[in-house]
Each structure stands twice: as structure tokens, then as C-alpha cells.
Amino acid sequence: MRLDRIVHSIANLWRRQVLWKKLSFCLICMTIFPLVLTMEIAEYKGEKVLTRIVLNHNRDIVERTAEDIDQMFSGKIKTLRIAVNTAEIKSMLPDRQSALLKTITDADADIQIAIVADSEGHQISRSDGRITDGEITYRDRYYFQKIKQIGETVVSDVLIAKSTGYPGIVIAEPIKDEHQQLVGVLIVNVKLQGIVDLINRSQIGQTGYAYLVNEDGHILWHPHPDRGMIERSEDVSSFAPVKAVMEKQTGLLEYEYKNKKRLAAFSYIPRTRWRLIVQQPIEEALADVSDIKRTTLMITLLATTLASLIAIAVTGMMTKPIIEISKAAGRLAKGNLNARSRVTTSDELGQLAVTFNSMADELCARTSALQESEEKYRSLVENINIGIYREIGDAKSFIAYANPALVEMLGYGSAEELLAIPVSARFWSMEDLAAVHGRIEQTGMVKNKEVRLRQKDGTPLWCSITAVKHYDHQKDGFCIDGVVKDITESKLAAEKLHQAHAELERKVAERTRELTILNEKLSQISLQDALTSIANRRYFDEFLGREWQRAKREQTSIALILMDVDFFKLYNDNYGHIAGDECLRKIAGALQKSVKRATDLVARYGGEEFAVILPDTDQAGAVRVGERILIQVRALALRTEMSPINEFVTVSLGIAATIPADNLTPDMMVMATDQALYQAKHSGRNQLQLASII
């Protein structure tokens, strides 16, 4: 009962207060409560939110860096796998291997040296051109032992290279003969600094750092080897980040070490089976929390004080105009149209007072405005040169009103004479009458309907009628208001224009047929190569784009072969352009013999380059066509003294096949095929090579 009395007393006190006090109290409470609540929430959850942000940021860093390292090794492994399948490496002859090894090291700045060792671990050839050291053997290396066991690519831990004496990582790729027996190992030593640069380019605060752990949980590389921390000890399997990464591969971790909390993120590197760990002291990550707390408190206190003062001032200004408008509205409600409110401000309340006064002014001026508007309307209707009328009832009734323009248009002497004629008599025929009134009855209106009206002398008059049916409250019935425009002259002009247009269309059609025949001839010429009589580059691009879209829509495979005549420039320079042109024509003929389907396209890609597009063809089918091309070209037996590889003209081919997807384009397929062609020429020419990835 006591609580009820307290609530009742507070309610009575609230009702006795004036409006500006109530508003002031409400505005102050509405301002202070959210500010205080915001400060409490920020203080309570700030550390957790910021911790999660830092963890997610570090996770993004470690995952991105791990992916970069994985991509780095993926590219190098791909290069080695291509290299071990070349004739130079498989030959196990130092003279043939050294040039290719040097090409590998020159193409990749991260590779210190490339070496080929035999199956017993002895050096066969080196990329630096030095004489192989017979005393150096790799049999004691873990990666050498591992590759002999599994026969697949092996990536080592960080070690000191025997050949260079510098730290690095070894990528070992098996060299196998045609029976898949191990005959040697291609060993590439990758600089450690390249991996370190990838790790160091991502900023992890001021004191955060990243380090690498191998698949056994041992540290491979650490940026602070002189700290003597547990991370540098030989047995780190129980250390929280290492233990987590060995169990889960990828994730986030908040842990405590030496009475200090730390944040860690870790990720797995598939190609090397390493783990990358990023860690940062939590005090560094949360360094800004204290500043945020102090700043928030100061802003809250300042905003509370300022809001209280503004609330009191605003409520005082708001109540006075409201009271003034209320009094003026009372007088206006009693019929005093001269009642006005005094405008004291230019804000919304002032605008409300202005609006109220405008409403009162509008009420006073409404009668005179309506009268003036009616006079203007009547003057416009009476003097306009377009016919205006009103009819009441159905089509059998009479016109109730017609302006002077309509009376003159229909040839009557006065409006009374026209109004005495039934509506149906105004139209030239019943069809014209139905065209207007039938449409009005269906939709309630007709717009720009062309019909013929009957003039007083009985001659027809072409007119355009726009009319609408509506309810007349004064007459308590429906009426039709319409506008009539004389279009006789334009109708006659339109008929003449139609005749002229028909004649012009006949002449245009005749010229179009002639141009079509010429365009077909020009199109055939523009899409054919003049020298070889096969498709040219322009038609190749159109055909590839069209077939690419069809294959993408139907999800079928499309194949592309790019071919280059080996050493053609030497042939052309030695035997002359006439012989060179004849050589290209014969090779074009060999290409056309190699394809079997009408849907395939043989084109001259440019110079001594040719292309074959094979719709609905997978990689195996494209290889069969490529082999037929090699056979057909050899069958030509075009003798040449300029080729260093054969006494007859030969060709090199690049082949690619794919099912188009959203992330692929025809240009990407051409680039991949061209890269395979380059590989064919680089591998000795007179052969075909497949694109590795499209």
C-alpha cells in the first residue's frame, strides 16, 4: 500500500508540472540514459570485441601469408614436374641437363641452384656450370631418403645446402624412366630469404611476429633466434600454439605464457606440410582500450551537461509558439477567418504558425479565386480555336453546350442551331458513332479517335475526338465532355505521304537486295585468308567466341590447337617469299586434311601461325587431331636446309581443351594454348605440348 501511495504522489506531482518542465525532464533522461548505457557497454565489452578483431586480423594475415607460401612452392613444383619430363633431364646426360638447369635458376630469383643427382645421390649436373663434386652425396639427406621411399615430390626443412653453403629449402622431384623406375632426382635449393620476405611483409603490430613449424612440431624459422624463448627449444610440442596447430591445422588461440596473455593465429601450408603461427601480446593489441575509456567518459560528461542545458532552453522555446497557435486555432474554429498566429521563430514551430496563417489566408481568398478561375475558364473555352462540347445522356440525346469554334467548324450559323440537332446526326456514319460512344461506354473515355463528322452542308469533316464520361452532381446524371480538332488537311497530307512512302520503300527494298548480294560477297572475302584460302584471323575470333558461348551454355568441351612452322623465317629468307607462300599453302592443305568434321575450323592465325578450333572435343580428341597434323606435315616432305633439327619442314603444336566456366574467357584459353606452343618449341620443336591448366 505504501508503494501505491508513492506512485500516486509522483503521478500527481507530474500532472501539476507545466509542459516545459515535463519536456525538459524527458529530454534530459532520454539523453543521459543512452550515453551512460553506451559507456557501460563499451567498457564491459570493449576488450572482448577488440580481442576478436585482432584475432580475426591476425587470422587473415596468417591465412594470406600461408597461401602465398603455398602458391610460391606450387609454382616451383609445377616447373620441376615439367622439367623432369623433358628429354634433356630424362637423358641423364650432364651436357644436355646443364642448360635447362640454368634456365630454371635464371627464371626464378628465389632458386639458388638446381642439381641433378643419380639414384645413388651423386651429382650429375649443376645449374651454375661448375664441375660436379664426386665427393658430395645426398644419400644422408632426409629428403633424398624420403623420395626413394614414396617416389613423389619432397620439400625439406630449412637446411644448409651442400652445394652453396647457404641456408635454404630443398624441393626434390623424382626423375623416372619410361618404366616409372627412379633414375635420378632433380634438386632445387630455394633461398630462405624469399619465404622470410613473404612473412615479414605483413605487419603484426609493433612486437608481434610469425614463425614456421614443421610437421613434427619443430621450429623451422624464427625471427628472434636469440631470445631463448620456449618457442626455440627442441621440444615445443606442449607449447600452446604449436600444440593447437598440430591438432587443428588452422584456427585462433588466446593463451597465457610467462604470466602474460597472448593472441595467436595459425594456418597449414599444404605443399610443404609446414605450419605458420602468428602471435602478438594482448597488452599491445588492447593498448587503445584505456584511451577509449577515458575519451568516452569525458564525452559522456560533456554531452550530458550540454544536453541538459539545451533541453531546458528548447522546451521553453517550444511551448510559447504552441500556446499561441492553440489560441489562434480556437478563434478560427469559432468562425473568425481573420484570426492569425504571431510568428516568433523560423524553426518548425515557426513554420507551423506560418502554415496556420497561410491556411487562414487561403480560406479567405478561396471564394474570389474560384470566381476568377471560372471566368478565365469560360474565356478560354469561348476563344480557343478547338471545338469543345458537352452532351448529356446517351447518343440519342442532344448537345448541351458547344463553343464557337465547334459551331464554325461544322458550318452552323449559331450554337442554338447546332444544339437542336441530335448527337447521332453529327456523325457521318453509324460506324463512326460507335467508334466514339462504344469506346466511352467500355472504358469511360476515348482519346484522339479519328472519325468523320457531318457538316451542315452534308460534306464529311475528318476530326480527332478526345472525350471523357463523368458524373455531374448538379444534374444528378452522367455527361460527356469532349474536344474536337479538325484534321482534314493533315489527313489528306498523310495519304499523300503514305503513297510517297510506299514508293520509297519499293525503291529501298530494290536497293537493299542489291546491297545484300554485294555484302555477302564482301563478307566471304573479308573472312578468308587470301594466301591459303582458309579462314583468316577475323573469322577465327568470331568463330571462337561463338563456339565458346555455345560450349558454355551446353557445358561441352571445346579444344584449341595453335601451330607454328619451325624456323620458317630462315626458310623464307633462304628460298624466297614465293617458296615460303607455297610452303604455307601446302601446310594449310595438310591441316584441312587432318580435321574430319565440318564443324571444325582451320584458320591462319598470323604469319606462319595456324589455328584449329575443335567444338565438342576433349583433350584426348584434340591430341589425336594434333598427331594427325604432325603426320600430314611430315608427309609433305618439304625439304629444307635451314632447319637445325630436321631435313624437312616441321611444325610445333600447343593444345588446350576445357569446358567453359564463368571464371574463364576465350582469351585465357588462347594464352594457355600459346604457352603450350612455346613449351613445344622450347622442348625441341617438331612435337605437341598440352596446356597444363586453363
Image: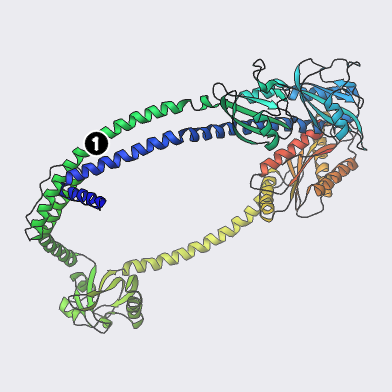
Residue 672: give x, y in percent of width and height: 72, 39
Which amino acid type corresponds to the residue marked 1 in the rendered image? Answer: Ser
> Residue at position x 34%, y 71% from top?
449
Left or right for 658, reference 298: right
Badge 1, how many Cα within 10 Å: few under 14, some, many 20+?
some
Report the number of numbered marks. 1
Residue 413: give x, y in percent of width and height: 16, 76
Residue 94 lies in quadrant = top right
Residue 533: give x, y in percent of width and height: 76, 46
Q: What residue is disc 1 on?
A: 308
Label 1: element kind = helix
- Which of these two is toward me, 603 or 576? 603
Which residue of the protein is positioned furthest toward the front in this rendering? 1
Left or right for 179, reference 504: right
Asked whether residue 607 is in view, the answer is no
- Which of these two is toward me, 188 or 285? 285
> Residue at position x 70%, y 32% from top?
70
